[in-house]
Image (tube, rainbow, N blue to C red):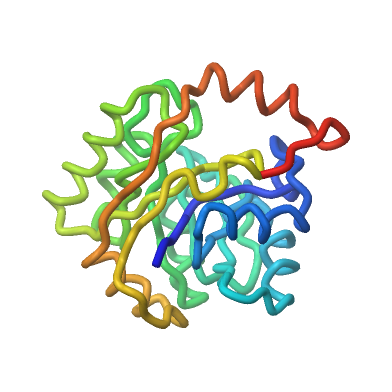
Amino acid sequence: MRLDLHSHSLASHDCDTPLELIAPACKVAGIDVLAVTDHNEIWGALELSKYAVPDLQIIVGEEVYTTEGEIIGLFLTELIPRNLTPEVTVERIHAQGGIALLPHGFDPLKPSRLTPKARARVADRLEVIEGLNGHVSWTGWNAQAALWGNLNGKPLSAGSDAHRAKDLGSVYVETPTRTIATPADLLEALKVGNLQGRWRNPVLSFFKERLFRQGVPSQP
């Protein structure tokens, strides 16, 4: 099975992918589990999770902007406010029974990455490290993230970081088929998963994401 654990919908300020395009795009890409992790919003993920879509499970997530960069929460039920400290953000994620995931944590060209000092402070409270992000500025930053995760004994995740329907599932974790109903299920799946997919040049993606706005077809 394939898991894409970092994606965006029109609930994000920098994405306008309609919710109705997400399931068809995942079907084309062969994605079985999709974490919808909009910037400081969860309404898109909650809306998608209401519908019984055959062969696609939605994990409600949020890419939360803290005072020192972004942290993703997975398996959320309530919105976590932005601009809290990294420590408090992780506490809020865990209070909901969720998982704290570090996205694109080593790309210095991403102004939203969690700062190295903050990363060190919350390292023991992060459950998952994103070892493969399809939208970093250079593939070497993924390698650094994966190395840091391995050295710290953290399961690695992969996410397309898609802001267009066409890019959903371009990066994923491949793992033996299983039920993923809880955070514990996901962590077990990641421990035996393999990170797969293709990197997208962020400069080209920037222009594509603005050229193919909804209204100009953006079909998968």
The residue sitting at the left extreme is 151
Residue 160 vertical placement versus 128 (above, below): above
Name the residue: 70% across, 39% down.
15
Q: Is residue 85 or residue 73 the one in the foreground?
A: 73
Name the residue: 57% across, 73% down.
55
Residue 207 vertical placement versus 86 (above, below): above
Residue 97 place in picture, x, y as percent = 46, 77
| Rendering quarter of residue 126 | bottom left
Q: Is residue 87 or residue 138 the one in the foreground?
A: 138
Residue 185 place in picture, x, y as percent = 36, 79
Residue 183 place in picture, x, y as percent = 40, 75
Q: Is residue 71 or residue 16 the one in the foreground?
A: 16
Q: Is residue 103 left or right of residue 52?
A: left
| Quadrant (top left, top right, bottom left, bottom right) of the C terminus | top right
| Quadrant (top left, top right, bottom left, bottom right) of the N terminus | bottom left
Residue 128 place in picture, x, y as percent = 32, 58
Name the residue: 58% across, 68% down.
58
Residue 108 vertical placement versus 54 (above, below): above
Name the residue: 34% across, 79% down.
184
Residue 195 vertical placement versus 106 (above, below): below
